[in-house]
Image: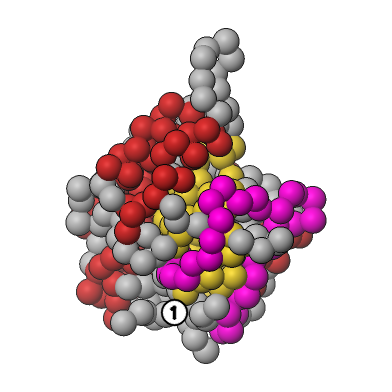
């Protein structure tokens, strides 16, 4: 049984937390608050947003407490992650999944936040959102397409329908033709791979899988995708959507496969429909994706793409 949060509206109180990495510039937290206020929300800032423990936004206890407390707070209607980096895997076993399931609310972030997306989907069947965070330039600068997609995804009580790339970007292309239907789940490939063998491992059965990453060389992406292949994830899934791969090209002067060669070698043999180039991930502009709701992947028509056919939110 899926757990769907209530839609956000202007004037709602949202919680800003940092369950991953620390800020290089503490002033970024105030900028994030100002950006969310410009979008019409009131903001409550968690202790993790101004904490630092090396590369982490405070101790594991501080970050886990923020997640649990903000889900438990009845005044908070949604939770926006401040940034990614690294840290969510360290707190997954400290989250109160029973309490979270009883108090569902909008939860949005991407990159390292994928760890929490996987855990909430697995443990609570909670619909969550892969999208820009508090310090994301697209929200701080008010980039039109990205902000519009973010607000629509977090406020719509009807299916989002077809998710088209912005006009400034090429349309998605087909790697493996076909058509598939299933719940959309996934996120940052590095985090998906890191969750293998844990209680929050990606459940690919009948799902449409979404992957993106940043700063990874093709051989590393090859290794992570091969791990998923050997675990049977591509045989189990219904289809695959490949998002943005920012700064993931070969290292200059060293022999390498292209990313498309890696995808063709590792993913394509499963024979599941695959599209490449959806503008979601570490890119600008970027779209917001709801995880845990039904989608249709069209990799056979003249205009391949992804269509959300189930509402992610309730009134």
Q: Give the left or right position of residue 300, taking residue 100 as reference.
A: right
Query: Counting other residues with Cα less than 10 Å from the Cα at mark 1, is it few (<14), some (14-19), or many (20 or more)?
Result: many
Q: How many marks?
A: 1
Q: Give the left or right position of residue 203, taking residue 199 as reference.
A: right
Question: Residue placed at 56% from the left, 48% from the top?
Answer: 175
Specify the quadrant that holds the N terminus: bottom left
Q: Is residue 29 visible?
A: no
Q: Given the current orientation, which residue lies at the most extreme top position? A: 253
Say above or below: 286 vs 314.
Answer: above
Question: Residue placed at 36% from the left, 79% from the top?
Answer: 3
Q: Which residues are magenta?
A: 156-184
Q: Quadrant of residue 203?
A: bottom left
Q: Quadrant of residue 166?
A: bottom right
Q: Given the current orientation, which residue lies at the most extreme right position? A: 167
Question: Residue placed at 53% from the left, 70% from the top?
Answer: 296
Question: Residue placed at 55% from the left, 36% from the top?
Answer: 260
Say above or below: 265 vs 128.
Answer: above
Q: Position of residue 83 (x, y in %)?
A: 49, 48
In the image, 136 versus 206, the foreground residue is 206
Say above or below: 148 vs 235.
Answer: below
Residue hosting label 1 = 5
Q: Give the left or right position of residue 285, taking residue 263 as reference.
A: right
Q: Position of residue 310 (x, y in %)?
A: 51, 80
Q: Position of residue 241 (x, y in %)?
A: 52, 54
Q: Element under label 1?
A: loop
Check residue 170 for magenta coloring.
yes
């Amino acid at each position: 049984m899926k757990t769907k949060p209530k839609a956000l509206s202007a004037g709602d109180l949202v919680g800003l937390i940092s369950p991953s990495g620390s800020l290089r510039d503490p002033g970024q937290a105030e900028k994030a608050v100002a950006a969310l206020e410009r979008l019409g929300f009131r903001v409550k800032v968690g202790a993790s947003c101004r904490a630092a423990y090396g590369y982490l936004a405070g101790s594991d206890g501080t970050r886990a407490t923020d997640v649990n407390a903000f889900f438990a707070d009845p005044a908070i209607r949604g939770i926006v992650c401040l940034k990614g980096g690294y840290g969510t895997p360290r707190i997954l076993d400290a989250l109160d999944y029973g309490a979270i399931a009883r108090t569902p609310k909008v939860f949005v972030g991407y990159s390292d936040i994928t760890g929490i997306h996987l855990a909430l989907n697995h443990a609570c069947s909670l619909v969550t959102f892969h999208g820009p965070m508090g310090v994301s330039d697209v929200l701080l600068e008010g980039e039109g397409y990205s902000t519009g997609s973010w607000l629509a995804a977090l406020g719509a009580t009807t299916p989002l329908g077809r998710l088209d790339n912005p006009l400034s970007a090429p349309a998605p292309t087909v790697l493996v033709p076909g058509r598939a239907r299933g719940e959309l789940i996934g996120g940052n490939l590095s985090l998906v791979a890191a969750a293998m063998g844990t209680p929050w491992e990606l459940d690919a059965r009948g799902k449409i899988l979404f992957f993106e990453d940043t700063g990874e060389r093709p051989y590393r992406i090859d290794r992570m995708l091969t791990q998923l292949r050997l675990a049977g994830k591509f045989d189990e899934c219904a289809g695959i959507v490949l998002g943005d791969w920012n700064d993931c090209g070969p290292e200059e002067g060293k022999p390498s496969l292209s990313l498309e060669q890696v995808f063709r070698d590792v993913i394509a043999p499963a024979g599941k429909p695959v599209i490449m180039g959806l503008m979601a991930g570490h890119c600008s502009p970027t779209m917001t994706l709801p995880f845990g709701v039904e989608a249709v992947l069209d990799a056979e028509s003249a205009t391949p793409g992804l269509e959300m056919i189930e509402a992610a939110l309730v009134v």
